Image (cartoon, grey):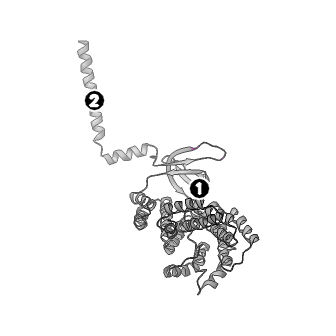
Amino acid sequence: MRNEERGTENEKRNRRIATIVRSSFSVPRSSFFVLWLLASPLAAQDQVVLQTEGTSSRLTMPCQIVDYTGERITVQFKSGAAQKTYPAEQVIEVRTAWLEPHELGRKLLSERKLDEATRALQAALVAEKRDWVRREILALLIRCGLRTGDRASAGTRFLQLLKSDPTTRQFGLIPLVWAAESVSGSAKSQAREWLKQDSDAARLLGVSLLLADAAVGDTATQELQALQRSTDERVRQLAQAQSWRLKLRALEIGDLELNRWDARIHEMPAKLRGGPSYLLGRGWAMRREHDRAATALLWTTLMDDGDARLAARAGVEAAESLKRLGQPDDARRLLQDIAARFPDTEFGEAAK
């Protein structure tokens, strides 16, 4: 009898449990989700990997990224909690869910399918609502424009990025002209508009594209002199380096001048050194100091490929300096690397 009673009690208990479970799921699923969200911590959608000052260990934080600028990253750990910020220089990596066209654009860019990448990234820019991710997409679009030589598009995207985050980590992507090249009519028209803007960065873009123009080159030169006194240190440093183009063109360089350029480059953030290092390499090559020319040009091609066409060009010119130094094997290996990394550029093709 006792076993039968225990069996009956168990059956009754199981029926009660089943009734509770059924009644729980009779609540509309949307309402259940809202109740769960209100009662639970914020879902951890993102991860931030930090390395704090004075430590060698890295900390991975599940969180929601609220904003990420050149100065700081702002995160939230749970619903209703106060947001926390960390210096941007402590950020090693951010992990988040990218939209499908964003992922596709990144993949196509890595495959050098630039037109398709641009279309996918433009779609991602329209669909993406997070400001900090939109800035990441803009940076990728700038790279696409630089790689295809579309300086008008690249410059427009850069100014959008800078407006969204004046402290941007991607300032090195500013699409300035460093080597002799033809500038399209549409890019020149856009450059004239940039010269009229209040933004020092916009005027620097305009100056750079028009500096060698026969019609407005003198006006661009005067504006360049003014920009060398900009209160924005990044603009000031790059404007000073852009003035070196005029000195190279006029053959007004000597060892003392080039050593001065070298010192100024080392005062710049690493992400701004690509173009200035290219001009330094050109200067040393003109002085037939090919060891120093190769060193400067290699920095551009190996350390800064934001402007892929400039990086490829610097690599080919570095290989020429290596040949003149009697290092044909090193030159050949460098050309092979350039051909593999930049096959879609003029100088990547020449490297073959």
Q: What residue is pinned by disc 1?
A: 72
Can you say whether 64 is above or below 226 in the image? above
Reading the chain from its start, which is encountered first: label 2 or label 1?
Answer: 2
Overall secondary structure of the magenta section: loop
Q: How far separated are the C-alphas under marks 2 and 1?
A: 54 Å
Packing grade of label 1 (10 A; few <14, some 14-19, many >=20) is some
Point out residue 19 in the picture as x, y percentages from the top left corner. Answer: 26, 33
Span highlighted in magenta in the image: 51-58
Q: Which residue is mark 2?
A: 16
Residue extending furthest bottom?
A: 215
The three-letter amino acid code for the residue at tag 2 is Arg
Toward which corner of the image does residue 224 lie, by quadrant? bottom right
Of 85 and 257, which appears nearest the observer?
257
Inspect the image, locate mark 1, and give the three-letter code of the amino acid beneath it.
Arg
Is residue 320 left or right of 20 when viewed as pictured? Answer: right
Q: Is residue 273 visible?
A: no
